[in-house]
Amino acid sequence: MGVQFTGICTDCGTRFAVNEGGGFFFHLLHCDNCGHEKTVGFGELGETHARYLKGLSGPYSIATAELEERMKACCKGDPLTQDVYHVEVEKHAGVCACGGQYRLDAPPRCPHCASTNYSADPKGIQVMYD
């Protein structure tokens, strides 16, 4: 489950929406250079995602466990480890327009100065999303 909240850049003071984490049906990646966000839906990954599910010892998500079982049953390929799967997701996400790479572990960045130094606005709203 992901979260969105208002962040305040500690370097330049810009207030901006910070999104962290993916959901039940998608991954959220950030550019490792500028912080631009990109989502990759599990459906876009097709067989790659099904092969990853096959390698898990339990469901990826309780909310989607039934769907996952059907996907695993139809999947012919060998299971993927998490490390290999992450490489494939990042490869699928591609290169950002700035030249950076979309990464699952890249942090959000200030849209004004690209700093990764920010704090949550204590007066801001926090929203959980799937």
Image (cartoon, helix red, strand yellow):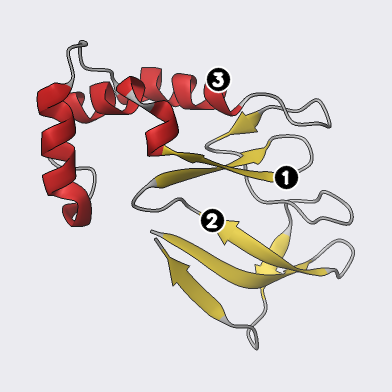
Quarter of the figure with the N terminus: bottom left
Q: Label 1: few (<14), some or many (≥20) within 10 Å?
A: many
- Note whether 84 is above or below 11 in the view shown: above
Q: Amino acid at mark 3?
A: Lys
Q: Quadrant of residue 123?
A: bottom right
Residue linked to disc 3 = 91
Q: Label 2: few (<14), some or many (≥20) within 10 Å?
A: many
Q: Amino acid at mark 2?
A: Glu
Mark 3 against mark 2, which lies toward the viewer? 3
- Note whether 44 is above or below 4 in the view shown: above
Quarter of the figure with the C terminus: bottom left
Name the residue located 58 percent from the left edge and 33 percent from the top edge: 103
The picture places residue 40, in percent across and down from the top left corner, at: 50, 38
Name the residue located 32 percent from the left edge and 28 percent from the top edge: 49
Q: Is residue 125 left or right of residue 110?
A: left
The residue closer to the viewer here, 41 or 102, is: 41
The picture places residue 46, in percent across and down from the top left corner, at: 35, 26
Name the residue located 17 percent from the left edge and 25 percent from the top edge: 54
Q: Amino acid at mark 1?
A: Gly
Compare marks 1 and 2 and give the one earlier in the sequence: 2
Marks 3 and 2, Cα distance to the nearest angstrom?
20 Å
Compare marks 1 and 3 and give the one earlier in the sequence: 1
Q: Quadrant of residue 111?
A: bottom right
As drawn, the label of residue 20 is: 2
Mark 1 against mark 3, which lies toward the viewer? 3
Q: Is residue 34 left or right of residue 90?
A: right
Residue linked to disc 1 = 35
Marks 1 and 3, Cα distance to the nearest angstrom?
17 Å
Q: Label 3: few (<14), some or many (≥20) within 10 Å?
A: few
